[in-house]
Image: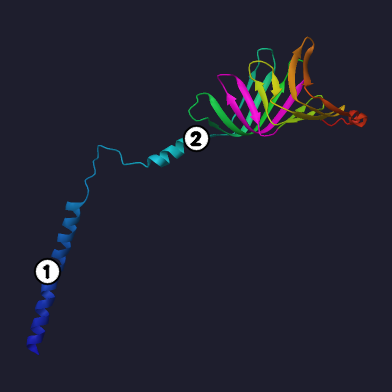
Amino acid sequence: MARTDDTYTRLVKTLRLALPLGALVILSTVFLVSKRVSLDQPPPFDELRLDQLLSDEHITGPSFATMTEDGSSVRFAADRAQPRGGTEGQYLAEAVRADIETSDGGAMHFEAPIAELDQEAKQLVMGDGVTILTSTGYRIEAETFTSTLDQTSVASAGEVRATGPIGNLTAGQMELLEQDDGYVVVFKDRINLIYDPTAEKDDTP
């Protein structure tokens, strides 16, 4: 019985010495075989993630105001805008609102889901279904409208639909033109007018 106790005691003493030494050997091996990290180089970065961040660069709530050379004021606002990839000075905007007040006192309010702003060409192209409300009581709709920012000029790229003081109207194109006594909205190309005398009594813009 005493011999068994001596054997157990020697085993416990041996393990007490061997286990800590084994742990030190394992820990030393980890440090010896671990990959060297250079402090002179920046940590690696996911290039795909970087490209995504750069392409998703955007501006929230952009707005600006300017004056045209012929004296009209232009105001522009959007919910969001971002640079158009690879093209300097061009932006894509969402949920766009724009206002033009001409020097003769007229006004036009634009609303569009999207727009392209070209600073170099000084041009704003609104699309995806545009609505215009005029101070003369017209509501004009078209797929696309183009407006210049240095001169008072607005034109549709195709068919327009309008409702106003004289009734309902469709035409192949609409333009805002300057005349001697001010600015006028001109409809042309395949004009179809349904005259409604009751519309003249409606003062709602």
Inspect the image, locate mark 2, and give the three-letter code of the amino acid beneath it. Answer: Glu
Q: Nearer the viewer, mark 1 or mark 2?
A: 2
Who is closer to the viewer here, 1 or 156? 156
Q: How is the image coloured?
A: rainbow
Real-space Cα distance between discs 1 and 2?
61 Å
Q: Is residue 156 left or right of residue 93?
A: right
Q: Which residues are magenta?
A: 105-129
Residue 118, position as x, y percentages in the image: 57, 23
The label shown at residue 93 is none
Q: Residue at x 50, y 30 (%)?
A: 85
The label shown at residue 17 is 1
Give the quadrant of residue 167.
top right
Give whichever of discs 1 and 2 has the lower sequence position.
Answer: 1
Circle 1 residues within 10 Å: few <14, some 14–19, many ≥20: few
Give the quadrant of residue 127.
top right
Residue lying farthest bottom?
A: 1
- Give yes or no for residue 90 being in the magenta stretch: no
Residue 12, position as x, y percentages in the image: 13, 76
Who is closer to the viewer here, 150 or 15? 150
Residue 67, position as x, y percentages in the image: 65, 17
Circle 2 residues within 10 Å: few <14, some 14–19, many ≥20: few
Query: Does residue 105 appear in the picture of this structure?
Result: no
Residue labelled with disc 2: 57
Q: Main secondary structure of the magenta part?
A: strand
